[in-house]
Image (spheres, coloured by chain):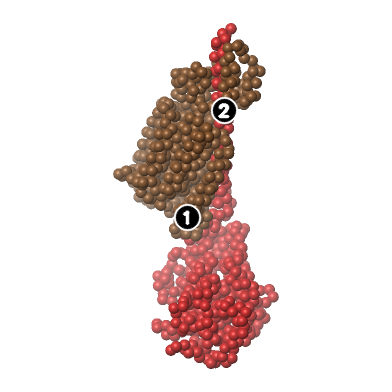
């Protein structure tokens, strides 16, 4: 029999314990809620890490700032580079001694665009380095390879390059220096990219000392990195600016060309003598320097600068391989001659062939500039697509009506003007010729011959941009070369 | 041939680590003691195995002549580390009462730290080892000290003043490094008080809410917390500021049990974040870098880009020790250690490391759950939150999941102050563990003494299940624990004659419990029936 006092003590004790437990249990529930919160955010971390590795890492590590290719080279045999129809343009061969050797079956033909895999890498070899060094084969196969000391086969890169077209253009160019770009304006796919002089990427390491010091910059990809005076092709820009400043009245322009125009002490002359009375259309198709010099003088220079910047002057081009930004500068402080020379493309302006090709592409594609690209797919060594590079819109350069207007002017060049050599054929061609006259103390005077334009039939469109260095003739050689390319591509 | 050894050791390390992590979670469940002891023994072997495997690879690498390390120094260093790990896992638990689960996970972190610090920078790792020894001494001191120092819970305002004082000292005297004001130069040492401010802050908040959770106290602590956070924002230490903010918010929530405070806090944080984005240039830069590190890859985005390259190139299984290139990541041994680990040991290892960190948090929270007194409970909880947030910030930052904040990964990253602070933190937690054990034992004793607690909802999970599984165990546990938390006289102090816990701030705004207690103590009621008890319970 317990006494009342004892009973009381026990009850008090129980009550205390009960209070403690209840209070604690409620707090404990809250602590577990906070723990659940941490479980959620830590799981998010883990899921993000998995997502990153599964979907993003491939693109992320393929960055020129990632200096880990040596790490991957130890476990992966570099993948092949293929043309658009699967022809092998570059592959790796493991020799008797276990050393890998890169083979380029087409030698010089793809030298700049495919690039090379030693001496710092270049071209697609550099831009898609990590894709080539990443293996997407099965995980167990990889682990088994690791234990057998066998390298995993790296992924292949399928390009947009058309081996036949590239080869044809390469042969056409012959010994001339210059560059040619062919692309599809609707997709941005680059079909061919030739730059001359060239080199043999199979022997790049052996000849490196000679190649890297040659005075003709043989390693430079002239198509994307070569800066050239645009010559008359720049009149597209001048024309466009004149249109922007006089959107209603630009077609009422008329000019009497006497073949020569005096500006202070110097003169501007037309190549083919006096053109006589001209409208804007005929001035453009005749590539009349006097008329466009006069137009240039009337332009609002600050606005012209803005327009040109919107048309990608001074901008890094959205390319995988290295490119140079085109240069343009004209301010109100410049002399009249500078202004006039610049508006006909003879001033300090410098443009890359790739830039001009993109400009023409957007006119051909109703004003939309597609992102030019060289690679379609990344494939496993078994041929399964692991990554698809879709056609992307880069930017809109012109409105639809502007593009249609410019298209009319470019057509006139071919039908009635300097571009007439590309008129005949089973395609409709558009374009602008140009001759860049350059006075150089070391080389003497020389002319670069330009043609930028496109041709289309019912199914296909092909933009071609040609620059030929140091041609004697008056700006027609590029256009003849282009005619042959169109003929080859569209068939006779 | 050597390559195959590298490969085998890489996969073995991964397997060991995965098993270790799973075991760590397993011992958190209520499994029989013999199984637990077996698990602990296995964990110890796994730590030593990973450590030995990696040092074997490092030795092979040194032998192949690629590294500028003297082989004999390396072996001596390995033996020193081995000795340390053995002492920590075998000797110390014999003399000091410890939560062995926590202790083993800590040792695993330290071993990973040893491996990567040695691999990244041998000389620095030796320095780091010495700092760690000093930290271990602090750890042991705190283990002993905290469970005996009853006065700790009364020093609320001293913690606050000390914390703010340290912060002001940093603001005034510090040198700017990496764009942030962090460290004080004391002769040859550079000291980062912010690491210790975190602990002081947790002590302060725990002390304050132990006293009272009234609205007035909430406001006062909120102001103090805001001052802490603001000073840190001015020091450009956004990571620490965010840690303090989250610690405060979560402790507030647990202490007051009002979710509305969390909502208010989140709203205040969002407003502050927007304001900070517009007011401070460095905040803007951080956010922009986080969104698009590729834009300025050579400048502000360099670190995060290199970190992503490392993780991406390493892949799921990693490149293996010395096969990667983690040195290209700036500050890899401090803020970016997870990227180096993921690159060379693989992302799967990284994922299990995150899980192990989560397990560590769970262990700390379990200490908080078992403990009785609000102060200790909040203290353990706050330190757990501090650890968890720190891990989240550093790993999330390295993965570009959240903006980079420059926080270290406790026990793994190099950095003296961070290491010392981590050891102090864990020392306190281990001391709290001992207190929690004595609390649990006390409860068991009540049960054994005949107190029928079964009617409290859910109580049977705790007590009965335990009894059902191990009927003998409770007797043993009655003798075993030394009542570090409360000596017999402290119980007297707690349960004074009024019948209330003078030192417990139970939530009783309407005096319900007080009434109930008075009723039970009423001498006119001789026998208390079960119905009465239920009645009281329902009123609650």
Residue pointed to by mark 2: B509
Residue pointed to by mark 1: B285
Q: Position of residue B117 (x, y in %)?
A: 40, 45
Palette colour of chain A: red
Q: How many numbered circles are shown?
A: 2
Please state if A160 lies on the left or on the right of B326 as rendered: right
Which chain letter goes with mark 1? B
Label 2 secondary element: loop
The C terminus of chain B sits in image quarter? top right
From the viewer's side, name the closer residue of A465 and B260. B260
Mark 1 burial class by Cα count in 10 Å: few <14, some 14-19, many 20+: some
Mark 2 burial class by Cα count in 10 Å: few <14, some 14-19, many 20+: few
Q: Which residue shows up at 43% across the image and 45% down it?
A: B232
The mark lying in front, picked from 2 and 1, is: 2
Q: Which residue shows up at 45% across the image and 59% down it?
A: B298
Q: In 3D space, how far apart are the residues under numbered discs 2 and 1 (Cα atoms)?
A: 48 Å
Palette colour of chain B: brown
Q: Position of residue A365 (x, y in %)?
A: 63, 72
Q: Position of residue A9 (x, y in %)?
A: 54, 14
């Amino acid at each position: 029999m317990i006494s009342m006092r004892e009973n009381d003590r026990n009850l008090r004790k129980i009550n205390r314990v009960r209070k403690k437990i209840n209070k604690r249990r409620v707090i404990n529930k809250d602590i577990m809620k906070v723990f659940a919160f941490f479980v959620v955010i830590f799981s998010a971390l883990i899921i993000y890490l998995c997502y990153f590795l599964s979907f993003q890492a491939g693109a992320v590590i393929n960055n020129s700032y990632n200096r880990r290719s040596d790490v991957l080279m130890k476990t992966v045999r570099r993948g092949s580079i293929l043309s658009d129809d699967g022809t092998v343009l570059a592959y790796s061969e493991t020799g008797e001694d276990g050393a890998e050797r890169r083979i380029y079956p087409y030698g010089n033909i793809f030298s700049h665009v495919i690039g090379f895999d030693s001496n710092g890498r270049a071209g697609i070899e550099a831009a898609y380095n990590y894709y080539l060094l990443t293996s997407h084969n099965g995980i167990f196969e990889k682990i088994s390879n690791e234990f057998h000391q066998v390298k995993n086969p790296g992924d292949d890169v399928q390009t947009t390059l058309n081996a036949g077209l590239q080869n044809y253009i390469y042969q056409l160019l012959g010994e001339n220096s210059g560059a040619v770009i062919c692309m599809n304006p609707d997709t941005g796919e680059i079909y061919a990219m030739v730059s001359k002089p060239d080199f043999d990427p199979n022997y790049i390491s052996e000849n490196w000392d000679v190649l890297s010091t040659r005075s003709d910059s043989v390693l430079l990809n002239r198509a994307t990195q070569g800066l050239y005076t645009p010559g008359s092709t720049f009149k597209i820009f001048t024309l466009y600016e004149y249109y922007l400043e006089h959107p209603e009245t630009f077609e009422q322009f008329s000019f009497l060309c006497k073949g020569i125009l005096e500006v202070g002490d110097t003169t501007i002359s037309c190549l083919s003598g006096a053109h006589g009375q001209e409208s804007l259309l005929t001035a453009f198709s005749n590539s009349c320097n006097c008329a466009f010099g006069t137009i240039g003088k009337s332009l609002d220079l600050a606005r012209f600068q803005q327009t040109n910047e919107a048309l990608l002057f001074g901008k890094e081009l959205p390319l995988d391989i290295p490119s140079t930004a085109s240069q343009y500068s004209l301010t109100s402080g410049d002399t009249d001659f500078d202004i006039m020379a610049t508006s006909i493309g003879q001033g300090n302006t410098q443009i890359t062939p790739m830039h001009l090709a993109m400009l023409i592409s957007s006119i051909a594609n109703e004003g939309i500039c597609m992102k030019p690209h060289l690679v379609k797919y990344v494939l496993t060594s078994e041929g399964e697509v692991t990554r698809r590079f879709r056609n992307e819109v880069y930017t809109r350069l012109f409105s639809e009506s502007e593009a249609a207007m410019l298209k009319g002017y470019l057509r006139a060049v071919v039908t009635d003007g300097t571009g007439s050599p590309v008129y005949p054929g089973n395609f409709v061609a558009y374009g602008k010729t140009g001759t860049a006259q350059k006075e150089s103390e070391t080389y003497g005077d020389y002319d670069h011959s330009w043609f930028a334009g496109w041709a289309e039939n019912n199914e296909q469109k092909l933009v071609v941009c040609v620059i030929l260095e140091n041609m004697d003739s008056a700006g027609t050689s590029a256009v003849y070369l282009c005619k042959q390319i169109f003929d080859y591509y569209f068939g006779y | 041939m050597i390559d195959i050894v590298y490969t085998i050791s890489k996969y073995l390390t991964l397997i060991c680590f995965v098993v270790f992590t799973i075991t760590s979670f397993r011992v958190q469940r209520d499994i029989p003691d013999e199984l637990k002891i077996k698990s602990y023994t296995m964990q110890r072997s796994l730590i030593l195995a990973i450590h030995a495997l990696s040092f074997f690879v490092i030795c092979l690498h040194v032998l192949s002549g690629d590294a500028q390390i003297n082989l004999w120094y390396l072996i001596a260093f390995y033996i020193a580390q081995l000795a340390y790990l053995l002492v920590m896992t075998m000797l110390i638990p014999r003399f000091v009462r410890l939560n062995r689960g926590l202790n083993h996970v800590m040792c695993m972190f330290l071993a990973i730290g040893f491996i990567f610090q040695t691999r990244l920078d041998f000389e620095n790792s030796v320095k780091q080892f010495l700092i760690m020894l000093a930290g271990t001494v602090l750890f042991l001191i705190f283990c002993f000290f905290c469970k005996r120092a009853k006065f700790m819970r009364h020093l609320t305002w001293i913690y606050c003043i000390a914390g703010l004082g340290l912060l002001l000292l940093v603001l005034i005297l510090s040198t700017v490094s990496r764009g942030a004001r962090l460290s004080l130069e004391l002769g040859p040492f550079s000291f980062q008080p912010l690491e210790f401010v975190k602990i002081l802050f947790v002590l302060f908040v725990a002390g304050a809410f132990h006293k009272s959770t009234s609205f007035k106290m909430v406001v006062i602590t909120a102001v103090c917390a805001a001052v802490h956070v603001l000073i840190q924002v001015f020091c450009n230490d956004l990571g620490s500021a965010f840690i303090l903010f989250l610690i405060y918010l979560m402790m507030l929530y647990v202490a007051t049990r009002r979710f509305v405070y969390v909502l208010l806090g989140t709203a205040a944080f969002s407003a502050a974040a927007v304001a900070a984005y517009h007011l401070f240039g460095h905040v803007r830069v951080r956010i922009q870098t986080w969104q698009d590190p590729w834009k300025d890859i050579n400048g502000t985005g360099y670190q995060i880009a290199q970190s992503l390259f490392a993780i991406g190139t390493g892949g799921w299984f990693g490149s293996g020790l010395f096969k990667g290139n983690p040195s290209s990541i700036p500050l890899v041994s401090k803020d970016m250690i997870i990227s180096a680990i993921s690159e060379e040991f693989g992302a799967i290892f990284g994922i299990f490391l995150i899980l192990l960190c989560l397990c560590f948090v769970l262990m700390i929270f379990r200490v908080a759950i078992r403990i009785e007194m609000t102060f200790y409970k909040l203290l353990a909880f706050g330190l757990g939150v501090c650890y968890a947030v720190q891990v989240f910030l550093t790993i999330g930052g390295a993965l570009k999941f959240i903006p980079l904040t420059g926080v270290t990964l406790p026990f793994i990253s190099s950095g003296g102050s961070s290491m010392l602070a981590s050891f102090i933190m864990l020392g306190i937690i281990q001391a709290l563990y001992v207190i929690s054990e004595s609390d649990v034992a006390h409860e068991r004793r009540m049960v054994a003494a005949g107190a029928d607690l079964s009617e409290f909802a859910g109580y049977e999970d705790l007590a009965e299940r335990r009894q059902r599984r191990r009927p003998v165990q409770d007797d043993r546990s009655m003798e075993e624990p030394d009542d570090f938390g409360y000596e017999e006289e402290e119980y007297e102090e707690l349960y004074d004659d009024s019948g209330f816990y003078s030192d417990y701030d139970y939530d009783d705004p309407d005096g319900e419990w007080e009434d109930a207690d008075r009723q039970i103590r009423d001498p006119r009621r001789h026998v208390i029936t079960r119905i009465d008890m239920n009645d009281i319970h329902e009123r609650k």
